[in-house]
Amino acid sequence: MDPPNVDTPPATADVVVIGGGIVGAATAFFLARSGRRPVIVERMDRLADATTRVSAHAVRCQFSEPENIDQTKESLAIYEGFADLLDRPEAGSAIGLCQQGYLFASTEPDEAPAFRARVERQRSLGVDDVELLDGDEIRHRFPWMSAEVAVGTFRQRDGWLDASAAAVELAAASGAPVFLGTTVVSIDIEAGRVTGVTTDRGRIATGDVVLAAGPLSRSLSPEPLPVALWRRHRIATRADDRVPAGAPMTIDANTGAHWRPHRGGAMVAWALPGSDREATWPVETDPAWPDLALRSETGVGRLSPFWRGLAAELTPADYLFTAGLYTVTPDHKPLIGPANETVGLWLNTGYSGHGVMGAPSGSRLLADLMASRVLAGDNPFHPGRFAAGTKPPDLEQIVL
Protein backbone atom coordinates (compact mmCIF):
# COMPACT_ATOMS: atom_id res chain seq x y z
CA MET A 1 0.00 0.00 0.00
CA ASP A 2 1.50 3.32 -1.08
CA PRO A 3 0.95 6.63 0.73
CA PRO A 4 -0.54 9.59 -1.14
CA ASN A 5 2.49 11.25 -2.72
CA VAL A 6 1.86 14.87 -3.70
CA ASP A 7 3.90 17.10 -6.01
CA THR A 8 3.19 20.55 -4.55
CA PRO A 9 3.41 21.26 -0.80
CA PRO A 10 0.38 23.05 0.65
CA ALA A 11 0.50 26.66 1.75
CA THR A 12 -0.49 25.67 5.28
CA ALA A 13 -0.51 22.50 7.39
CA ASP A 14 -1.73 21.43 10.79
CA VAL A 15 1.63 19.81 11.58
CA VAL A 16 4.69 19.13 9.42
CA VAL A 17 6.71 15.96 10.03
CA ILE A 18 10.26 16.31 8.71
CA GLY A 19 11.61 12.89 7.83
CA GLY A 20 10.08 9.91 6.06
CA GLY A 21 11.98 7.06 7.70
CA ILE A 22 10.51 4.65 10.23
CA VAL A 23 10.40 7.36 12.94
CA GLY A 24 8.77 10.00 10.75
CA ALA A 25 6.24 7.56 9.32
CA ALA A 26 5.31 6.26 12.77
CA THR A 27 5.01 9.86 13.96
CA ALA A 28 2.54 10.67 11.18
CA PHE A 29 0.53 7.54 11.93
CA PHE A 30 0.09 8.21 15.63
CA LEU A 31 -0.53 11.93 15.09
CA ALA A 32 -3.34 11.03 12.69
CA ARG A 33 -4.81 8.60 15.22
CA SER A 34 -4.80 11.39 17.79
CA GLY A 35 -6.81 13.66 15.50
CA ARG A 36 -4.04 15.74 13.93
CA ARG A 37 -3.58 16.19 10.17
CA PRO A 38 0.14 15.74 9.44
CA VAL A 39 2.09 16.11 6.23
CA ILE A 40 5.44 14.37 5.67
CA VAL A 41 8.40 16.07 4.00
CA GLU A 42 11.19 13.73 2.88
CA ARG A 43 14.32 14.69 0.95
CA MET A 44 14.81 11.23 -0.61
CA ASP A 45 12.78 10.06 -3.61
CA ARG A 46 11.34 7.18 -1.58
CA LEU A 47 10.24 6.74 2.00
CA ALA A 48 12.66 4.99 4.38
CA ASP A 49 15.44 5.09 1.79
CA ALA A 50 18.19 6.60 3.94
CA THR A 51 19.20 5.39 7.41
CA THR A 52 16.17 3.12 7.84
CA ARG A 53 17.10 1.20 4.70
CA VAL A 54 20.67 0.53 5.89
CA SER A 55 19.75 -0.36 9.48
CA ALA A 56 19.79 -3.87 10.94
CA HIS A 57 15.94 -3.81 10.95
CA ALA A 58 15.96 -5.51 14.35
CA VAL A 59 14.01 -5.23 17.60
CA ARG A 60 14.83 -6.62 21.04
CA CYS A 61 13.71 -6.14 24.61
CA GLN A 62 16.93 -7.27 26.28
CA PHE A 63 17.88 -3.95 27.86
CA SER A 64 18.77 -3.10 31.45
CA GLU A 65 16.92 0.17 32.06
CA PRO A 66 13.16 0.23 32.61
CA GLU A 67 12.38 3.03 30.16
CA ASN A 68 14.24 1.23 27.35
CA ILE A 69 12.46 -2.02 28.14
CA ASP A 70 9.05 -0.36 28.29
CA GLN A 71 9.64 1.35 24.96
CA THR A 72 10.87 -1.71 23.08
CA LYS A 73 8.19 -3.99 24.59
CA GLU A 74 5.50 -1.63 23.34
CA SER A 75 7.13 -1.33 19.92
CA LEU A 76 7.47 -5.10 19.56
CA ALA A 77 3.81 -5.55 20.52
CA ILE A 78 2.89 -3.01 17.82
CA TYR A 79 4.88 -4.91 15.22
CA GLU A 80 3.32 -8.20 16.37
CA GLY A 81 -0.17 -6.73 15.99
CA PHE A 82 0.65 -4.63 12.93
CA ALA A 83 -2.16 -5.93 10.71
CA ASP A 84 -4.79 -5.30 13.38
CA LEU A 85 -3.41 -1.87 14.26
CA LEU A 86 -3.52 -0.73 10.64
CA ASP A 87 -6.75 -2.68 9.96
CA ARG A 88 -5.07 -4.10 6.90
CA PRO A 89 -4.45 -7.89 6.81
CA GLU A 90 -1.67 -7.53 4.25
CA ALA A 91 0.34 -5.21 6.50
CA GLY A 92 1.52 -8.03 8.75
CA SER A 93 3.02 -10.04 5.91
CA ALA A 94 4.43 -6.88 4.33
CA ILE A 95 6.76 -6.21 7.25
CA GLY A 96 7.83 -9.86 7.57
CA LEU A 97 8.36 -9.90 11.34
CA CYS A 98 10.72 -12.79 12.08
CA GLN A 99 10.99 -13.75 15.75
CA GLN A 100 13.98 -16.08 15.79
CA GLY A 101 15.38 -14.47 18.90
CA TYR A 102 18.42 -12.59 20.12
CA LEU A 103 21.38 -14.50 21.56
CA PHE A 104 24.10 -12.71 23.52
CA ALA A 105 27.00 -15.12 24.10
CA SER A 106 30.38 -14.98 25.85
CA THR A 107 33.44 -17.22 25.95
CA GLU A 108 34.33 -16.02 29.46
CA PRO A 109 33.05 -18.35 32.25
CA ASP A 110 33.73 -15.62 34.83
CA GLU A 111 30.99 -13.54 33.20
CA ALA A 112 28.26 -15.98 34.23
CA PRO A 113 27.31 -13.99 37.39
CA ALA A 114 26.96 -10.81 35.34
CA PHE A 115 24.76 -12.57 32.80
CA ARG A 116 22.66 -14.04 35.62
CA ALA A 117 22.25 -10.61 37.22
CA ARG A 118 21.22 -9.12 33.88
CA VAL A 119 18.57 -11.79 33.38
CA GLU A 120 17.22 -11.31 36.89
CA ARG A 121 16.96 -7.58 36.35
CA GLN A 122 15.25 -7.96 32.99
CA ARG A 123 12.75 -10.39 34.44
CA SER A 124 12.03 -8.03 37.32
CA LEU A 125 11.29 -5.32 34.74
CA GLY A 126 8.80 -7.44 32.83
CA VAL A 127 10.93 -9.33 30.31
CA ASP A 128 10.02 -12.59 31.98
CA ASP A 129 10.80 -14.84 29.02
CA VAL A 130 14.52 -14.09 28.74
CA GLU A 131 16.65 -17.18 29.41
CA LEU A 132 20.07 -17.71 30.96
CA LEU A 133 21.93 -20.47 29.10
CA ASP A 134 25.22 -22.22 29.73
CA GLY A 135 27.55 -23.19 26.92
CA ASP A 136 26.22 -26.73 26.56
CA GLU A 137 22.62 -25.56 26.25
CA ILE A 138 23.63 -22.92 23.70
CA ARG A 139 25.38 -25.53 21.54
CA HIS A 140 22.43 -27.94 21.94
CA ARG A 141 20.04 -25.33 20.55
CA PHE A 142 22.49 -23.75 18.13
CA PRO A 143 25.02 -26.43 17.12
CA TRP A 144 26.99 -24.06 14.88
CA MET A 145 28.24 -22.16 17.96
CA SER A 146 31.85 -22.48 19.13
CA ALA A 147 33.00 -24.96 21.78
CA GLU A 148 34.47 -21.95 23.58
CA VAL A 149 31.07 -20.38 24.33
CA ALA A 150 30.49 -20.48 28.08
CA VAL A 151 27.35 -18.48 28.86
CA GLY A 152 24.65 -16.47 27.17
CA THR A 153 21.16 -15.03 27.28
CA PHE A 154 18.38 -15.70 24.79
CA ARG A 155 14.88 -14.36 24.16
CA GLN A 156 12.78 -16.00 21.48
CA ARG A 157 10.34 -13.11 20.86
CA ASP A 158 13.11 -10.72 19.81
CA GLY A 159 13.89 -10.60 16.11
CA TRP A 160 13.79 -8.44 12.98
CA LEU A 161 11.49 -7.13 10.26
CA ASP A 162 11.45 -5.09 7.06
CA ALA A 163 11.50 -1.65 8.63
CA SER A 164 11.33 0.12 5.27
CA ALA A 165 8.09 -1.69 4.45
CA ALA A 166 6.79 -0.85 7.93
CA ALA A 167 7.49 2.83 7.30
CA VAL A 168 5.60 2.78 4.00
CA GLU A 169 2.64 1.02 5.61
CA LEU A 170 2.52 3.47 8.53
CA ALA A 171 2.75 6.49 6.27
CA ALA A 172 -0.03 5.16 4.04
CA ALA A 173 -2.25 4.35 7.01
CA SER A 174 -1.77 7.86 8.37
CA GLY A 175 -3.38 9.36 5.29
CA ALA A 176 -0.74 12.08 5.41
CA PRO A 177 0.29 13.72 2.12
CA VAL A 178 3.93 12.84 1.43
CA PHE A 179 6.29 15.23 -0.32
CA LEU A 180 9.22 13.21 -1.64
CA GLY A 181 12.39 14.66 -3.11
CA THR A 182 11.76 17.77 -1.04
CA THR A 183 14.57 19.36 0.93
CA VAL A 184 13.87 21.40 4.04
CA VAL A 185 15.80 24.64 3.83
CA SER A 186 14.82 25.97 7.26
CA ILE A 187 12.39 25.72 10.13
CA ASP A 188 11.07 29.26 10.39
CA ILE A 189 10.98 30.91 13.80
CA GLU A 190 9.54 34.25 14.93
CA ALA A 191 9.73 35.42 18.55
CA GLY A 192 10.78 31.94 19.67
CA ARG A 193 7.83 30.23 18.01
CA VAL A 194 7.56 28.03 14.91
CA THR A 195 5.80 29.73 12.01
CA GLY A 196 6.51 27.36 9.16
CA VAL A 197 8.89 25.26 7.12
CA THR A 198 10.69 26.55 4.04
CA THR A 199 11.50 23.86 1.47
CA ASP A 200 13.15 23.96 -1.92
CA ARG A 201 9.65 23.62 -3.40
CA GLY A 202 7.90 26.28 -1.36
CA ARG A 203 6.97 27.33 2.16
CA ILE A 204 4.45 25.58 4.41
CA ALA A 205 2.99 27.75 7.17
CA THR A 206 2.41 25.79 10.38
CA GLY A 207 2.58 26.20 14.13
CA ASP A 208 3.87 22.68 14.82
CA VAL A 209 6.87 20.89 13.35
CA VAL A 210 8.10 17.44 14.32
CA LEU A 211 11.79 16.93 13.64
CA ALA A 212 12.12 13.21 12.91
CA ALA A 213 14.94 13.35 10.40
CA GLY A 214 17.45 11.08 12.13
CA PRO A 215 21.02 12.27 11.50
CA LEU A 216 19.77 15.35 9.63
CA SER A 217 17.87 16.53 12.70
CA ARG A 218 20.98 18.12 14.18
CA SER A 219 21.64 20.40 11.22
CA LEU A 220 17.96 21.23 10.67
CA SER A 221 17.22 22.14 14.29
CA PRO A 222 17.10 25.87 15.03
CA GLU A 223 18.58 25.11 18.46
CA PRO A 224 21.53 22.88 19.43
CA LEU A 225 20.83 19.19 19.89
CA PRO A 226 23.15 17.03 22.07
CA VAL A 227 23.66 14.30 19.50
CA ALA A 228 26.68 12.71 17.88
CA LEU A 229 26.55 11.17 14.41
CA TRP A 230 28.51 7.94 14.30
CA ARG A 231 29.09 5.80 11.25
CA ARG A 232 27.90 2.20 11.45
CA HIS A 233 28.60 -0.44 8.79
CA ARG A 234 26.78 -3.58 7.76
CA ILE A 235 27.11 -6.32 5.16
CA ALA A 236 24.32 -8.32 3.55
CA THR A 237 25.73 -11.46 1.94
CA ARG A 238 24.43 -13.50 -0.95
CA ALA A 239 22.39 -16.62 -0.21
CA ASP A 240 24.47 -19.53 1.06
CA ASP A 241 23.21 -22.76 2.63
CA ARG A 242 26.04 -22.69 5.18
CA VAL A 243 24.24 -19.87 6.98
CA PRO A 244 21.80 -21.48 9.46
CA ALA A 245 18.43 -20.17 8.30
CA GLY A 246 16.85 -20.64 11.72
CA ALA A 247 19.56 -18.82 13.68
CA PRO A 248 18.84 -15.92 16.02
CA MET A 249 20.56 -12.56 15.98
CA THR A 250 23.88 -13.78 17.37
CA ILE A 251 25.95 -11.24 19.28
CA ASP A 252 29.48 -11.76 20.58
CA ALA A 253 29.19 -10.14 24.00
CA ASN A 254 32.97 -9.93 24.24
CA THR A 255 33.66 -8.09 20.99
CA GLY A 256 30.29 -6.80 19.76
CA ALA A 257 30.45 -8.53 16.36
CA HIS A 258 27.02 -9.84 15.37
CA TRP A 259 25.10 -11.48 12.55
CA ARG A 260 21.69 -12.85 11.67
CA PRO A 261 20.08 -14.69 8.75
CA HIS A 262 18.95 -12.48 5.89
CA ARG A 263 17.23 -13.61 2.67
CA GLY A 264 19.09 -16.91 2.49
CA GLY A 265 22.40 -15.31 3.42
CA ALA A 266 23.29 -13.18 6.42
CA MET A 267 23.53 -9.66 7.69
CA VAL A 268 26.72 -8.77 9.57
CA ALA A 269 27.33 -5.69 11.73
CA TRP A 270 29.89 -4.50 14.27
CA ALA A 271 30.71 -1.23 16.00
CA LEU A 272 34.45 -0.72 15.54
CA PRO A 273 36.24 2.26 17.13
CA GLY A 274 38.54 3.72 14.52
CA SER A 275 36.45 2.51 11.62
CA ASP A 276 33.23 3.98 12.98
CA ARG A 277 33.64 7.70 13.48
CA GLU A 278 31.81 11.01 13.39
CA ALA A 279 30.35 11.35 9.91
CA THR A 280 27.66 13.03 7.86
CA TRP A 281 25.09 11.81 5.36
CA PRO A 282 25.69 10.38 2.80
CA VAL A 283 28.17 8.08 4.51
CA GLU A 284 31.36 6.80 2.93
CA THR A 285 32.27 3.24 3.87
CA ASP A 286 35.62 2.11 5.26
CA PRO A 287 37.11 -0.41 2.79
CA ALA A 288 38.94 -2.19 5.62
CA TRP A 289 35.76 -2.99 7.54
CA PRO A 290 34.58 -6.15 5.70
CA ASP A 291 37.86 -7.93 6.27
CA LEU A 292 37.81 -7.05 9.98
CA ALA A 293 34.22 -8.17 10.50
CA LEU A 294 34.33 -11.32 8.40
CA ARG A 295 37.88 -12.62 8.73
CA SER A 296 39.61 -11.23 11.82
CA GLU A 297 40.05 -13.30 14.98
CA THR A 298 37.54 -11.13 16.82
CA GLY A 299 34.95 -10.99 14.02
CA VAL A 300 31.81 -13.08 13.56
CA GLY A 301 33.81 -16.29 13.10
CA ARG A 302 34.97 -16.23 16.72
CA LEU A 303 31.65 -17.56 18.08
CA SER A 304 30.26 -19.01 14.84
CA PRO A 305 33.11 -20.97 13.19
CA PHE A 306 31.18 -21.69 9.96
CA TRP A 307 31.93 -18.07 9.08
CA ARG A 308 35.63 -18.84 8.67
CA GLY A 309 35.09 -21.01 5.63
CA LEU A 310 32.32 -18.88 4.21
CA ALA A 311 34.17 -15.59 4.68
CA ALA A 312 37.29 -16.94 3.01
CA GLU A 313 35.33 -17.36 -0.21
CA LEU A 314 33.41 -14.07 -0.18
CA THR A 315 34.40 -11.36 -2.61
CA PRO A 316 32.90 -7.86 -2.82
CA ALA A 317 30.62 -9.17 -5.56
CA ASP A 318 29.06 -11.55 -3.01
CA TYR A 319 27.77 -8.94 -0.57
CA LEU A 320 26.22 -5.51 -0.27
CA PHE A 321 28.39 -3.25 1.88
CA THR A 322 26.72 -0.11 3.27
CA ALA A 323 27.02 2.34 6.13
CA GLY A 324 24.52 4.45 8.00
CA LEU A 325 24.54 6.78 10.97
CA TYR A 326 23.65 6.38 14.62
CA THR A 327 22.21 9.59 16.08
CA VAL A 328 23.54 9.24 19.63
CA THR A 329 22.59 11.21 22.74
CA PRO A 330 24.69 11.38 25.94
CA ASP A 331 22.55 8.75 27.70
CA HIS A 332 21.82 6.70 24.55
CA LYS A 333 18.10 7.44 24.80
CA PRO A 334 15.97 9.38 22.33
CA LEU A 335 14.86 12.99 22.42
CA ILE A 336 11.05 12.89 22.44
CA GLY A 337 8.93 15.92 23.21
CA PRO A 338 9.03 19.70 23.01
CA ALA A 339 12.32 21.37 22.17
CA ASN A 340 13.94 23.31 24.96
CA GLU A 341 13.78 26.79 23.46
CA THR A 342 11.35 26.87 20.54
CA VAL A 343 7.57 26.73 20.97
CA GLY A 344 5.97 24.45 18.40
CA LEU A 345 9.13 22.49 17.67
CA TRP A 346 8.80 18.85 18.68
CA LEU A 347 11.63 16.32 18.64
CA ASN A 348 11.47 12.63 17.82
CA THR A 349 15.10 11.77 17.17
CA GLY A 350 18.34 10.65 18.82
CA TYR A 351 17.43 6.97 19.09
CA SER A 352 21.11 6.02 19.37
CA GLY A 353 20.96 3.11 16.96
CA HIS A 354 17.61 1.82 18.21
CA GLY A 355 15.25 3.69 15.90
CA VAL A 356 13.50 0.62 14.49
CA MET A 357 13.12 -0.72 18.02
CA GLY A 358 11.77 2.47 19.50
CA ALA A 359 9.93 4.25 16.68
CA PRO A 360 6.38 2.94 17.24
CA SER A 361 6.37 3.48 20.99
CA GLY A 362 8.29 6.75 20.83
CA SER A 363 5.94 8.14 18.19
CA ARG A 364 2.86 7.13 20.17
CA LEU A 365 4.39 8.94 23.15
CA LEU A 366 5.07 12.05 21.08
CA ALA A 367 1.48 12.15 19.83
CA ASP A 368 0.24 11.86 23.42
CA LEU A 369 2.57 14.64 24.52
CA MET A 370 1.33 16.92 21.75
CA ALA A 371 -2.25 16.16 22.79
CA SER A 372 -1.40 16.81 26.47
CA ARG A 373 -2.33 13.24 27.38
CA VAL A 374 1.14 12.75 28.89
CA LEU A 375 2.89 15.35 31.03
CA ALA A 376 6.57 16.20 30.64
CA GLY A 377 7.30 14.86 34.12
CA ASP A 378 6.07 11.43 33.07
CA ASN A 379 8.27 11.32 29.97
CA PRO A 380 11.73 9.77 30.55
CA PHE A 381 12.86 10.95 27.10
CA HIS A 382 12.06 14.64 27.55
CA PRO A 383 14.68 16.76 25.71
CA GLY A 384 14.86 19.05 28.75
CA ARG A 385 16.72 16.39 30.71
CA PHE A 386 19.94 17.75 29.20
CA ALA A 387 21.36 21.06 30.34
CA ALA A 388 22.15 23.73 27.79
CA GLY A 389 25.53 23.10 26.22
CA THR A 390 25.54 19.35 26.91
CA LYS A 391 28.10 17.69 24.71
CA PRO A 392 27.35 14.56 22.68
CA PRO A 393 29.18 11.36 23.66
CA ASP A 394 32.54 10.18 22.40
CA LEU A 395 32.67 7.00 20.35
CA GLU A 396 34.20 5.06 23.27
CA GLN A 397 31.02 5.71 25.27
CA ILE A 398 28.72 4.26 22.64
CA VAL A 399 27.42 0.76 23.29
CA LEU A 400 25.59 -1.75 21.10
Image: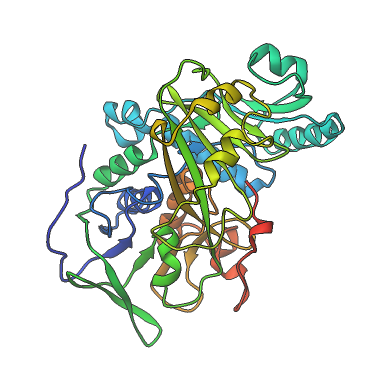
92, 344: nearer the viewer: 92
Image quadrant occupied by the N terminus: top left
Q: Nearer the viewer, residue 154 or 370?
A: 154
Q: Residue at x 41, y 27 (%)?
A: 238
Q: Quadrant of residue 124?
A: top right
Q: Position of residue 185 (x, y in %)?
A: 29, 73
Tally of numbered discs: 0
Residue 134 in the image, given as x and y percentages of width and height: 78, 21
Q: Quadrant of residue 208?
A: bottom left
Do we see residue 116 in this rendering?
A: yes
State left or right for residue 333 relative to residue 323.
Answer: right
Q: Position of residue 108 (x, y in %)?
A: 82, 31
- In the rendered structure, the answer to whether residue 167 lies left or right of residue 75 reads left
Question: Farthest left residue?
Answer: 7
Residue closest to the eye, 123 or 256: 256
Q: Is residue 130 visible in the rendered structure shown here? A: no
Percent across and percent down for residue 77 are 48, 34
Task: Tell me which residue sits at (26%, 66%) in the image.
Answer: 183
Side (left or right) of 75 relative to 254: left
Q: Nearer the viewer, residue 94 or 175?
A: 94
